[in-house]
Amino acid sequence: MANKISRRKFLKYMGATAVSVGALGGSTKAIGQAKRPIPTTPIKIAAVSFLTGAAAAPFGIPGDNTFKMCADVINKEGGILGRKIELASKDEAGGVDAQVKLARKLILEDKVDVDLGYISSASCLAVLPLADESGGLIVAYDCGTHELMEGPKSPFEVPKFKLGFKSSAHLGIDNIGLALFIKKYYPNIKKVAGINQDYAWGRDSWLIFETAMKKLMPNVQVVKTLWPPLGNTDFTAHISALMGAEPDIVHSSLWGGDAVTFTKQALGMGFFKKIRMAYSRGEPYPQEVGKDYPEEQIICCAGTHYFLFTPPDKTSAGLQKWFVAEYRKRYGKYPSYPCYHAYQALYAYKNAVEKAAKAAGGWPTIDEIAKAMTGLTFPSPSGPITIREDHSAIEDVLVGFSKMTPKYPFPILDPKRMEIFPAVQVNAPVGMRTVDWINSWK
Amino acid sequence: MREWKIVMWVVYTLNGLYFAALLFLTSLGLNIILGVMGILNLAHGSLYAIGAFMAAWTIIQIATKAPASFLFLSLLSGLALAGVVGFLMEKSLIRAMYKRTLEYQLLLTFGALLLLEDVIKMIWGGQAYYASAPFDFLGAVDVLGHVYPIYFLFVMGITFFAGLFIWFFMGRTKLGIMLRAISLDREMATGLGLDIGRLSTFAFVLGSGLAGLAGALVVPTTPALLGIGMEPLILAFIVVVVGGLGSLKGALVGALLVGFTRSFGIAILPEIELPLLFLIAGIILVVKPQGLFGR
């Protein structure tokens, strides 16, 4: 409760800052600076997501759909300061080298105003340094790694990139959120295990979860950690190995086809009768798998990105209602968390441009937009988003249990047992590495 | 507690058998093509992927409309299409490679791999195909108090009969004996008047069809996705290295060895899941470079 009040206070404070920044803009104009014209040409925005491959169906396509939907809506409402958005959807497939080349081309040759993109942590780590190198604005919208904006040791200097931003929180919130949730609902469990893919995403997710569990529930023993390769098609050996180790709860950051394959095969092998899964980003899969998806599994939403969640503030709640209905109307599905991430990236840019334009008295430069984006708070369908001075967004996180209801053809998160952990509880403070922060918990 | 542990060892064994069954089918095709034609087909994984996509697509088309028996017949669509693609590949590309050295074959079949990957993308798009109807339909059976999916047993059964068929075909039929003659001594076989061209086409189609069948059998347990053929290709190579080139017995023993090592390895030593199989292949290469049953 205390956290809620402090967040409200914080928002009020942010509002006051925005007003004062506006006033400041007014006063500089008054001194006699010439008003900068707003170009009549469209704003060029590149949106890079996986349009092919394993990550396309669960993340890339929903993310890209949302970029298109939001750009369309913004254009119908008159664009950003009267300028229409010209959106170019690009494919993130082809590996890191291809993405570095593409980002360079987008910024230097195509001269896009902003590059919004990247689902893979590897793409983000490779592409974001190009922002300062090539002088283009890059906003990472979905990738999870906590290493992206963190320095080598605490305390580190911020921001890491002058023109590089991350408009969603990193994987820390999911895995800390899961640990907090487990402590609250299962304070007496003895054994946990993990199954995570054998690369940065899986290893980082497990690291944060294990560190948080050690701090929160020091008596819990880790009985098995499995590392299947990405794109594994046969999980029977893993499922049996987990069942043999008899943990109470299994942590997993599996995604895409792997998450679906694991769930399907585990169902077939009676896994869920004995063991509960805790999925760090499990939100899209009940909808993908359908009514067979097991109940009572712990599912995290990469934030509060859930189509049945109503944010406490009115503006965001209104946006959520519109967002879910509009997405469903256009694409026949309920929006999953990558959709919310795409919204956040595009509207972070829109809000920053509008804020910067007010201050500059005309169309802002890239540096001015970056300055405006730093410390920006704006409403989104899943609640207000704040991008801190480390250029990284922080978010609350929602964790719940899957439960079948008569209303939906797939299990939803049980509305009676949804937990929301506020941003301050799951995000490390500015300049501090997440692991160091967790280890400093009292 | 103790009893449960024993049950789990039984299940690990079943898992190992299931994985070995799929591997055996995939590597059998690779092995026939390698043995009879001397072609190392890097595009073998793509034929597996074509089988997977075709079967997934067919299952999705008929899942709600046709009776259940059609679900299982639709798995054969994967075998059929992979066979057709294999036929076209042999007639157009592979044919020119018989007299060339290994480097040319590798370059050409690698090119075919990239090409087929794009063809799959062109036909089926970038999305995932979920086709679990046969898996769901068969349900589960009780193995000493542990639930086990019947579909996995079905795959083992199909593989057993496919293996038996190939063994009978290669050992007892005239066509099979001719194929073995070519694999033993190509020049002598030509001298005896065997139609090498047609027999080679046949061997390539047979191998491709087996890859397609393996892909089709997998797809009810995992979505068909771009790149689905890469992992089985690598594993099939490990099996061929372990078991020995051109040996049916080798493919069987190699597949079982890889299947069991993986299943028990993940249960006992999960940290080295990825390097474990390569380690075995490495040891075999050092100790017995021709493979366990290689000539």
Image (cartoon, coloured by chain):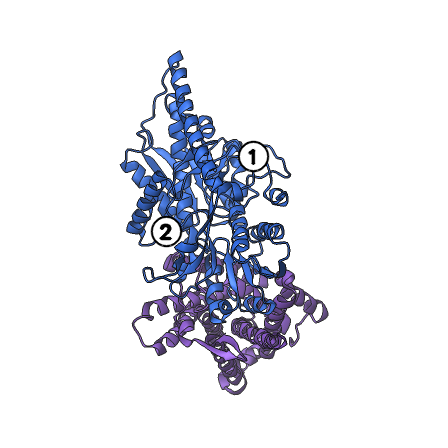
Mark 2 Cα-neighbour bin, 10 Å: few <14, some 14–19, many ≥20? some
Residue at the top extreme?
Answer: A31
Quarter of the rendering containing residue A226: bottom right
Q: Is residue A322 left or right of residue B130?
A: left
Q: Residue furthest front?
A: A1
Q: What residue is rendered at 71% in x and 67% in y?
A: B286
Q: Is residue B183 visible?
A: yes
Q: In which quarter of the image is residue B270?
A: bottom right
Q: Which mark is residue A160?
A: 1
Residue located 41% across and 70% down the image: B78
Query: Type of residue at label 2?
Result: Leu
Residue at which label 2 appears: A308
Q: Where is residue A432 in the image (x, y as percent from the top left)?
A: 60, 38
- Name the quadrant of the N terminus of chain B: bottom right
Image coordinates for residue B170, horizontal then vertical, percent: 53, 82
Dot 2: element? loop
* Colour representing chain A: blue
Residue reaching furthest bottom? Answer: B172
Q: In which quarter of the image is residue A428?
A: top right
Question: What residue is shown at x 68% (from left), y 67% (from top)?
Answer: B285
| Chain B, colour shown | purple
Q: Give me the chain letter of mark 1.
A: A
Examine the rendered structure and indicate whether residue A234 appears above or below residue B175: above
Label 1 residue SS: loop
